[in-house]
Image (spheres, rainbow, N blue to C red):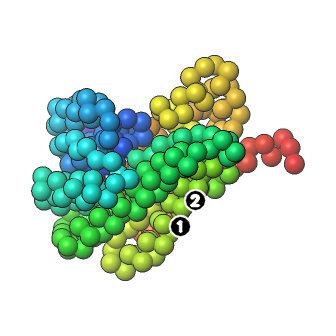
Amino acid sequence: MTPPSTPQRLAGQNALVTGANSGIGEGIARELAAEGANVVVNYVVQPDAAEKICAEINAAGAGKAFPLQADVSREADVTAMFAAAVKHFGTLDIVCSNAGIQRDSRLADMTLAQWEQVIGVNLTGAFLCAREAVREFTRRGMRDVSRALGKIIFTSSVHQEIPWGGHCNYATTKGGIMQLMESIAQELAPQKIRVNSICPGAIETAINRKAWSTPAAATALKKLIPCGRIGVPADIARVAAWLASDESDYICGASIYVDGGMTLFPGFATGG
Ligand code: BGC
C-alpha cells in the first residue's frame, strides 16, 4: 500500500533564514525546504557550510535553496541581501530572523566591543531584517500561497525571560527582541502580517558547545531542564515550519518557548 503523501505546508512560498549555515538556522532552513519552501540560506562566514546545505536541500527535491552572504548588523548588507533574494525568487513570504551571537563576559570585564557586537547582530539585525521583510510584503501585496501577507519569525531565547549573569549583552538583546516582536506584531496584524518568536532553551549547537560537550557539563545543564534532555535543532525547526504555515494563522505576537521546561523554574521542584 502506498503511504498517504504528506502535503507540503509551505509549497510555493519563499523564505529567508539568517544565520542558516549552522545550528538552529540550518535546521530551520532544511525544515522549511522539506515543507516545500524555497529558501535563502544566509551566512556571514563559512560559505562552504552554506553551499553544502544548499546543495543537499536542492538534491532532496523539495524546495530550492541558494546561499547569500550578509552581515545582518550592517544596513547595506541587509538591503542588498533582500534585493538579491527578491531578484532570485520573485518575492519573500517568510523571513526567519535567526542570526545570533554570544560574546560572554562578567559585567566589570565586558568591553564596549563585546556589548556592541551582540547588540548589532542580535537586535539591530532583527530590526533591519524585519523592516526589509515588511517593505517587501507590502510592495508585493497578497498572493494565493498563504492567508497571510507575510510571516516574520524571530529566534529569541529563554533569556528574554530568564536573567543571565555573565551574559548581560545577550540577555538584553533577547529582552529587546520580545518588545520588538510584540510592538510590530501589534502594528502589522491589521495588514495580515504575522510576527512571532520562538524561544529556544538549551539546544545542542556550536554557540553553547561548552555547556553540553563534556559529560559533567551535560549533567549540570540537564538539571536546568525538567524534561531531562538537551534539545536539538529539529525541535526548533518543526515549530518554525508550523509557525510559518497557515495552521498557525491565528497566532500573532506570541513567544513560543521550546525549552524542555527550562522556564518552569526547575529549582522550585524541590526548593522554595
Ligand atoms: C543560549 C545558549 C544557552 C541557552 C540556555 C540560549 O539562548 O544561546 O548558550 O545554552 O540559551 O541557557
Amino acid type at image mark 1: Gln
Asked whether, in this view, residue 102 is left or right of residue 152, the answer is right
Q: Is residue 73 above or below residue 143?
A: above
Q: Is residue 106 above or below residue 80?
A: above
Q: Nearer the viewer, residue 29 or 123?
A: 123
Q: Is residue 208 above or below residue 73?
A: above
> Is residue 156 visible in this depiction of the protein?
no
Q: Is residue 105 above or below residue 48?
A: below
Identify the element where label 1 is drawn: helix
Residues at discs 2 and 1 in contact (Cβ within 8 Å): yes
Measured as percent of width and height from the top left, residue 191 is found at 32, 78
Task: Tell me, for residue 151, which label it has, or none.
Answer: none
Amino acid type at image mark 2: Gly
User: For the residue carrying disc 1, how many other residues have a C-alpha within 10 Å: few (<14), some (14-19), or many (20+)?
Assistant: few
Kindly report the distance in space between the C-alpha atoms of the residues bearing marks 2 and 1. 7 Å
Q: Nearer the viewer, residue 166 or 17?
A: 166
Q: Nearer the viewer, residue 99 or 235?
A: 99
> Is residue 73 visible in this depiction of the protein?
yes
Q: Residue at x 53, y 45 (%)?
A: 114
Residue found at the very far top of the displayed protein? 215
Residue position for label 1: 179
Q: Residue at x 12, y 52 (%)?
A: 88
Measured as percent of width and height from the top left, residue 180 is found at 48, 66
